[in-house]
Every structure is written in C-alpha cells, then in structure tokens.
C-alpha cells in the first residue's frame, strides 16, 4: 500500500473487502485506501476517522524495532531530547519529558522534504540550469574578449616592430653617411702619402745618379732637399669613427608601450589610518539605514518612518512617507539598476521603486513579516530578513521575486537567527547578518551553511550589532549601538573575511555617540549615520596602493 508512488500511473484499488473501485480517498487514521462509494460507510463505522484525498494522505509510520527492546516498535517522539524511542524506553528514561506522536513528526518531515524537493525542481534546478546557460554564454564572451586582446597585442607588436625597423633604417643611413665621409678623408690622406713616397724615391734616384760627378753647389742643394724631404710627409691622423651608445633594454618601459595584462584584483587597496573626509547634514533627524545611489545620491530612513533620497549636500530629492513601517532597521536597498527596494512590514510586501518613482508590488511574503533587505550585486538576488512571532530567517529571492531559498537552521538543527535586523553580502557571496537580539553577527555561505558568529570584543562589555556592511577586501564592518549611559559602547568593529577581529575601526572616542546606519560608497569610503542627530559622517580608511 505504501509503495504506491504519488505520480505513478497506477489504478489504486479500494482496500474495502470485495471492493475493487478506484481509490480516490485515504483514511489517515487506519491507513486504508477508500473509494467514493465506501467513504460514507467507513465514516459511519469508524467515528472520528480522518479521510482525505489520496494525494494528501499521511504515510504510515514504517516499522523500526528498538535496539534495547527488540520486540517493541519505535513509535514515540521525545520533544525534550528530540529523539524517537519506543514506549518502554520513554517510560523508563523520558517519563518527565514531553512527547509527540512519531507518525505526525514523520509525516511533517516528509512534507518538508517534499516541499523542499518541489522547490528544488521548480526553482533551484531551473535557476541552476539558467546559470549553466549563462556561464556558457559568458565563457564564449570571455573567449571573444581574449581573442580581441590577442588582436590588439599583435597590432601593437606590429606597430612596435615598424617603429624599431624605422629607427634601425634611420641609424643605418646615418652610419652610411659617416662611413662615406671618413673613408673619403682616409682615401685623400692615402693619395697624398703615395705622392710623397713617389717624390722621395725620385729625389734619391737623382742623387745617386749624380754622385760621381756632382759639383759642390749641387751637393749642397741635395743636402737641403734631403733635409726638407721629411717635412713633405703628410701627418698621421686617426679616422673619426661615430660614438655608438647601446641603449639599455627596459622591460617595464616596453610593457607600458606594448600592453600590460593582469587579472582584476582588489589587492591594490590596503588598510590605512582612519580619517574623517566630510559630514553631510540631512533635513530629517535620525538615520536608521543608508543605501548609496551612485554616483552622488543616497537613500536614508529617518525617525518618522520616511524613506528619503538626498544629494551629497543633504538636499531632499525624493520622499516616500509611510506610517506602515514599524521595523525601520535595514529595510531598504538599491539594486544594480539603481532601483529602490523597501519592505512594508504591516502589509507584508516588498515594493520596487524605479528611477522615475513609479512603485509596484514586487514580492508578497505571506505570513512572514519582511524586515531587513539586501540586493546582491553578485547575482542580483534579493536577501530578506523574515519574522513571525519569535522566529527569524533569511529568504533568498531571484531578481524577478521568485523564492529560491530559506536560511533558517545550522548544521545542528538550531535556529541561526533571533532577529536579523541588518543584512549584507561579502565579496565571496557569504551572507552576513547583525542579530541585535542574539547580540552577535552571524555569517553563512551562499548556500546557507553556517560559518561563524562574532559576539564582540573583550574591550567592550556589551555588544549589540546594528548596521553592517563589507568592503572591497572582504572586511566585515559592524556598528555597536548599545543604548547605555556608558559611552564605551558606541564603535565600529572591523573583522576580516573569516570573522577574526582586526580592530575598533572607530573607537568610542572617534565614533558618533549613537551609530546605527553603515554603508560603503563607490569610492570605498565608510558612511556612518546616527540616531541622535541629522549628521551623516564619511570616513576614509582604505589606501589605494597604486596612487
């Protein structure tokens, strides 16, 4: 009976004796299949039985024997120990504990699994397949872009080769000119020297032929000619060769002229000393949350539940007035397209506001109250902090508003959040939430796997995290906004990507007295808004190492 699959094309027969009609119904009490004809008679014979449509049936609890009492079925669920046991074990070891019907627990878990599988088939797998398709397209784009780079490099190499060939040609022409000039000069010197040799040889021959009969006056003339003969010899001179200076090959200079290839990296930034850059005075007091709207605007939530768009001088550009927001914390975000998303708690709606201020209902959250919201620049998903009674979770939607994921439990079955009032995302996709009620920052992976939590630094005796953001290096920045007469609590904590405390980026002496809102702008500056004034402070704490 229990082996019949929900989706099988199978004729399901009624379990009533001698009835072989199609079984459209199911009795959850006695676990029997029932046809329409037998339904009324079954209820008359079995008062109080629960009959439902067959596809809505509860599964019969599978038989599983107790290891301690092999004759007993495990049929009781101990609520306190969260463990299924047999009846004898419960009486012996759990009698003071609360218990539940194990079959109800079993079917509840089955329903959750079925719901999860349905969600996977309807949303997760299609989204994953879409991502595979997108990755394929992006791969092709990467190939095309890199092919362009190769063409550019080849073109530039040809240009540089032409430049080198031109320089070589010019230098060879200069050398040809110098060579011709030097050789002509040397040729003239050689000619003069040969003429001098010819003269001397003739003079010596005349002298030797006249020695037997030379007169005294001729002899004296020969003596003078011989004395002057050496003066007619041309002077020696070295050829004037060109000065040749071999240029040094500077690879960096060639790279500058050719091209430089590097993978985009955030390592060009590093931490530096903190300095206040500016202050902006806004027109409404108190700032619960800030969302930058590049290049020179931002949205803020004030004490009167208004959403206000400001310019950098603090002038009001747009205003959304609403009294229906009673959870004011991280309740708005700006998408990569520049649209505003904000949550309406009382109506359980997430609104989308375009740049022309037209507003539409984007997501309805049912019985859950939406609070904090964050639009991911990585995949354009929407992360929403949800509340109902004393339960909190984070739900992921795609940009169209289709639900993809609930993040609610850790690997030990414990709830991750008590009150996730601010949400952000790190550069690696980790989800960071400040839980004011639980007094900690909770970080999970993109798939919802618990990574770590941070509960403050020992230098401060109380930690109540509020505004939270991350930067280009993966640092996590979070406000400590505990309301106390002790001024030691107001601060901004700086953590690394793995949750290790690095410093009080803004100490109680540097920090505004009641920091609440926190964000990073497109210039990598830290913005801090506080509840007790109308001032938004801007700090620089990262240094660009390439400047």
Image (cartoon, rainbow, N blue to C red):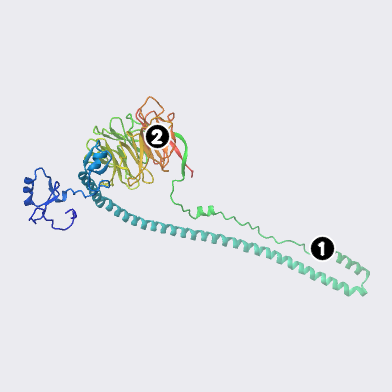
| The label number, if any, that marks residue 323 in the structure image | none
Q: Quadrant of residue 449?
A: top left
Give 331 or 459, whichever is nearer the viewer. 459
Q: How far, Cα to Cα, is label 2 from label 1?
A: 103 Å
Q: Please determine whether, in this image, residue 337 is positioned above or below residue 514.
A: below
The location of residue 372, given as percent across then percent down, is 30, 38
Q: Residue at x 43, y 50 (%)?
A: 264
Q: Please determine whether, in this image, residue 19 is positioned above or below residue 66.
A: below
Give 470 or 405, whichever is nearer the viewer. 405
Q: Please determine whether, in this image, residue 209 is positioned above or below residue 111.
A: below
At numbered mark 1, what does the secondary structure look like: helix, strand or loop? Answer: helix
Question: In screen coordinates, is 472 left or right of 17?
Answer: right
Question: In screen coordinates, is 512 left or right of 54?
Answer: right
- Is label 2 in contact with label 1 (beta carbons under 8 Å)? no
Question: In screen coordinates, is 332 left or right of 166?
Answer: left
At numbered mark 2, what does the secondary structure look like: helix, strand or loop? Answer: loop
Q: Which residue is mark 2?
A: 456
Q: Quadrant of the N terminus?
A: bottom left
Q: In the orientation shown, which residue stands out farthest toward the top?
A: 485
Q: Quadrant of residue 526?
A: top left
Work out whether residue 519 can be spotted: yes
Q: Nearer the viewer, mark 2 or mark 1?
A: 2
The location of residue 443, given as percent across then percent down, is 36, 41
The location of residue 348, given as percent across then percent down, is 23, 38
The location of residue 79, given as percent across then percent down, is 25, 39
| The label number, if any, that marks residue 231 in the structure image | 1
Work out whether residue 361 can be spotted: no
Q: Quadrant of residue 313?
A: top left
- Total labels drawn: 2
Q: Residues within 10 Å of mark 1 (few under 14, many from 20)?
A: few
């Amino acid at each position: 009976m229990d082996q019949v699959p929900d989706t099988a094309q199978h004729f399901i027969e009624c379990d009533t004796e001698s009835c072989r009609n199609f079984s459209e119904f199911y009795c959850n009490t006695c676990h029997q299949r029932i046809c329409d004809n037998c339904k009324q008679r079954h209820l008359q014979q079995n008062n109080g039985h629960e009959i439902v449509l067959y596809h809505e049936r509860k599964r019969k609890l599978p038989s599983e024997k107790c290891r301690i009492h092999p004759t007993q079925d495990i049929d009781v669920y101990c609520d306190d120990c969260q463990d299924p046991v047999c009846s004898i074990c419960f009486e012996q070891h759990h009698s003071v504990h609360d218990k539940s019907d194990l079959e109800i627990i079993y079917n509840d878990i089955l329903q959750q699994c079925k719901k999860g599988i349905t969600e996977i088939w309807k949303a997760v797998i299609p989204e994953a397949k879409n991502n595979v398709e997108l990755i394929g397209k992006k791969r092709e784009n990467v190939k095309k872009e890199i092919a362009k780079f190769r063409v550019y490099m080849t073109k530039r190499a040809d240009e540089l080769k032409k430049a080198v060939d031109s320089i070589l040609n010019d230098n060879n022409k200069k050398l040809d000119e110098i060579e011709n000039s030097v050789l002509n000069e040397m040729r003239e010197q050689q000619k003069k020297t040969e003429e001098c040799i010819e003269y001397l040889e003739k003079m010596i021959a005349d002298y030797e032929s006249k020695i037997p009969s030379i007169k005294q006056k001729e002899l004296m003339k020969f003596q003078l000619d011989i004395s002057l003969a050496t003066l007619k010899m041309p002077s020696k001179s070295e050829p004037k060769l060109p000065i040749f200076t071999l240029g040094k090959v500077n690879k960096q200079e060639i790279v500058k002229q050719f091209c430089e290839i590097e993978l985009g990296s955030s390592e060009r930034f590093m931490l530096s000393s903190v300095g206040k850059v500016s202050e902006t005075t806004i027109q409404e007091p108190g700032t619960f949350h800030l969302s930058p709207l590049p290049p020179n605007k931002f949205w803020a939530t004030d004490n009167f539940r208004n959403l206000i768009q400001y310019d950098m001088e603090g002038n009001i550009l747009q205003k959304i007035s609403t009294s229906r927001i009673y959870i004011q914390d991280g309740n708005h975000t700006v998408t990569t397209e520049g649209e505003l998303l904000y949550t309406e708690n009382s109506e359980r709606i997430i609104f989308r506001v375009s740049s022309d201020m037209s507003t539409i209902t984007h997501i309805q959250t049912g019985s859950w109250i939406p609070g904090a919201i964050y639009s991911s620049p990585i995949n354009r998903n929407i992360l929403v902090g949800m509340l109902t009674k004393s339960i909190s979770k984070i739900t992921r939607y795609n940009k169209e508003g289709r639900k993809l994921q609930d993040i609610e439990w850790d690997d030990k079955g414990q709830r991750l959040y008590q009150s996730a009032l601010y949400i952000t995302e790190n550069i690696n996709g980790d989800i960071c939430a400040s839980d004011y009620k639980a007094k900690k920052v909770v970080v999970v992976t993109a798939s919802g796997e618990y990574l770590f939590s941070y509960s403050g630094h020992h230098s401060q005796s109380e930690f109540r995290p509020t505004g939270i953001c991350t930067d280009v290096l993966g640092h996590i920045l979070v406000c400590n906004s505990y309301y106390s007469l002790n001024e030691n609590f107001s601060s901004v904590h700086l953590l690394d990507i793995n949750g290790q405390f690095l410093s009080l980026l803004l100490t109680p002496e540097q920090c505004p007295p009641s920091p609440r809102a926190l964000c990073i702008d497109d210039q990598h500056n830290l913005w801090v808004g506080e509840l007790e004034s109308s001032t938004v402070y801007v700090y620089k704490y990262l240094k660009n190492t390439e400047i």
